[in-house]
Each structure stands twice: as C-alpha cells, then as structure tokens.
C-alpha cells in the first residue's frame, strides 16, 4: 500500500503535467486566438507555438481569419411597384481584427447574416421589378457598400455580396413572356417594313436611273438626227448652189438634173402618202425623159433669147 507522502507526490506530479499541457498552446495557420487573464482580454496569439501562464491566462476566442461565406436564405421582398419577389444570395467576409470581432459583437456570423438580409430587403424594395432583373450588379454593389460600412466596428471586411436568384411570381413571369413575344413580333414587323421600304427605294432608284439613261439616249439620238439633217441640208444647199451656178453659166445638163431630181422626189412623196389619191402621170420612163427633155428645150430657147444681140429680129420656124 502507498503511504500518504507517496500519494501527495504523485498528485503533485500529475497536477504539474496537467498545468504544463494547459499552458502550451499551438495556433493553426489561418486562425488567431485571444488570451484572457482573469476574464479580461490581454493579447492575441498568432499561428505558431505559445506558452501561457497557468491558472492566470487562458484562451478566450478562436477566430477564423480566412475568408468565409454565408448563405442568405430565400426571403420575400416587395418591390417599389408592389411586386412580390423571392431572393437569396451569398455574402463573403473576412475577419481583419480578431479582438474586435470576438468582443464587439455576439455571434458574428448571425449578426452579419441578419444585417445583410435587412439591407437586402431595403435595397431591393427601393427598385422596380424591371430594375431588379436588369441591374443585379448595382444591387450587389449597394449591398456590399452598406453592409461593409456597418461591419467595420466589428473588425470585419465584407469582400463580396452576390444575389443568386430573383424569382418573380408566376403570373408576372407569364406576363413578361407575353410582353417579350410582343416586342419580338414588333421588331420583326418593323424589320420587315424597313426591308420592303428599302426594296421600294432601290426599285425606284433603278427606274430613275433607267429613265435618265433612256432620256440621255433619246437626246443623243436627236442630236445625231439633227446633225444628219444639218449635213443633208448642207449637201442639198451645196448641190443647189452648184446647179444654180451651172444654170447661170448656161449648162443645160444642170437644169435637167435639177428638174429630174425634184420630179423623182415628188413621185416618191406621192407614193409614200397614206391618204387616198389619184395622180395622172406618164406611165413609161420615156415619157418622163420626154418631159425632162421638153423642159430642157424650153430652157435652150430661153437661153437663146437672152443671148441674141440687141436690134435683131427673131426668126419664125
């Protein structure tokens, strides 16, 4: 049997071992521990090996210094235009000051969650439904700004707040679907009308260019015809001048050519006239030549009379 001194020695040794193990503290990476002496905060233990004063000091709070995430449960929000929507999200935060996060607020995660949910209803309630669905980034930025400012006294940094889902009521979703379909039908009708208008414009421009080219063609043809008529008139004038000159010089062949040409032109004009007509004319070519010859003889007689000397008596055959 053990005597009393031996029991006391064993007890003292056991107590010393317990005190030694209780005084040794190892802090893991990513955490910080607060140290309390008689219940009052004294210092912060960073990751590594530390020794506390037994019976006087103890570890108070073990704070996670890594970035953490909290799920925001789905909640009903009434928008500015009185639409009931459901919304949820996530919030990311990181503890920067372990003593303040441990002693400035009780239950840090619940405090951040409730603060975020409250401001979520406030921010989303100040916006219309269309703004909620189209400006989600603005909602996230406003939420993060408000919540981060509110949590600064707690030694916490809000890094991100993301809205995961916004669920409008079923009837609003159906109405939005019909509205979107109507908008697409409207855009399709507008595009079709614009296409038809462009086609009409192109067609009108083509007809305009064709009319311009046709007018230019007619103008060029008229110019060519006028030029041809001018040249023909010049040639005819020149021929008439030559014939007149030959007649003045007493050449009987010139008058024969001139009269014969006019005679043939007159016959050609009568033949091409569409009106009904009755023309008496020699039917044989010899008659025509004879007529021309008679005219030529008449011209000779006139020429002789003009060239007879003054005072002479004309002879009668």
Image: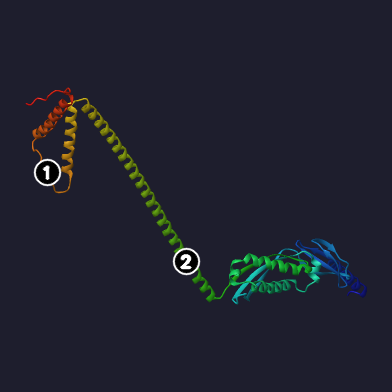
Q: Residue 122: where, in percent of width, then height? A: 67, 73
Q: Residue 301: where, in percent of width, then height? A: 13, 28
Q: Residue 135: where, in percent of width, then height? A: 61, 66
- The quarter of the image holding the C terminus is top left
Whether residue 161 appears in this view of the structure is: no
SS assignment at label 1? loop
Which of label 2 and label 1 is nearer to you? 1
Name the residue at 43% across, 56% down: 198
Q: Quadrant of residue 312?
A: top left
Q: Quadrant of residue 196?
A: bottom left
**Which residue position is annotated with label 2?**
186
Q: Earlier in the sequence, mark 2 or mark 1?
A: 2
> Could you tell whether 14 is left or right of 205 in the image?
right
- Crowding near pointer 2: few (<14 within 10 Å), some, many (20+)? few
SS assignment at label 2? helix
Q: Quadrant of residue 161?
A: bottom right
Residue 279 is labelled as 1
> Could you tell whether 113 is left or right of 224 in the image?
right
> Could you tell whether 208 is left or right of 56 in the image?
left
> Could you tell whether 40 is left or right of 85 in the image?
right
């Amino acid at each position: 049997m053990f005597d009393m001194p031996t029991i006391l020695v064993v007890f003292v040794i056991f107590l010393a071992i317990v005190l030694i193990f209780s005084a040794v503290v190892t802090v893991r990476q990513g955490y910080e521990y607060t140290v309390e002496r008689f219940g009052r905060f004294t210092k912060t233990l960073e990751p590594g090996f530390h020794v506390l004063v037994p019976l006087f000091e103890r570890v108070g709070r073990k704070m996670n210094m890594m970035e953490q995430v909290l799920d925001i449960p789905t909640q009903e929000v009434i928008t500015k235009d009185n639409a009931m929507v459901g919304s949820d999200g996530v919030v990311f935060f990181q503890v920067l000051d372990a003593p303040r996060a441990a002693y400035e607020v009780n239950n840090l995660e619940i405090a951040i969650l409730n603060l975020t949910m409250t401001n979520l209803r406030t921010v989303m309630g100040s916006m219309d439904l269309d703004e909620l669905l189209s400006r989600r980034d603005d909602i996230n930025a406003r939420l993060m700004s408000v919540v981060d400012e509110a949590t600064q006294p707690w030694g916490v940094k809000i890094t991100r707040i993301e809205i995961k889902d916004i669920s409008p009521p079923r009837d609003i979703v159906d109405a939005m679907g019909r509205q979107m379909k109507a908008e697409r039908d409207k855009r399709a009708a507008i595009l079709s009308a614009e296409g038809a208008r462009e086609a009409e414009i192109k067609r009108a421009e083509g007809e305009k260019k064709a009319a311009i080219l046709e007018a230019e063609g007619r103008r060029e043809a008229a110019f060519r015809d006028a030029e041809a008529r001018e040249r023909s008139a010049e040639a005819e004038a020149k021929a008439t001048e030559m014939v007149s000159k030959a007649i003045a010089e007493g050449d009987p062949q010139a008058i024969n050519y001139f009269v014969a040409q006019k005679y043939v032109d007159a016959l050609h004009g009568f033949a091409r006239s569409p009106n009904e007509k009755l023309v008496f004319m020699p039917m044989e070519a010899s008659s025509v030549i004879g007529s021309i010859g008679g005219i030529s003889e008449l011209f000779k007689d006139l020429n002789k009379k003009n060239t007879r000397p003054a005072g002479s008596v004309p002879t009668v055959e």
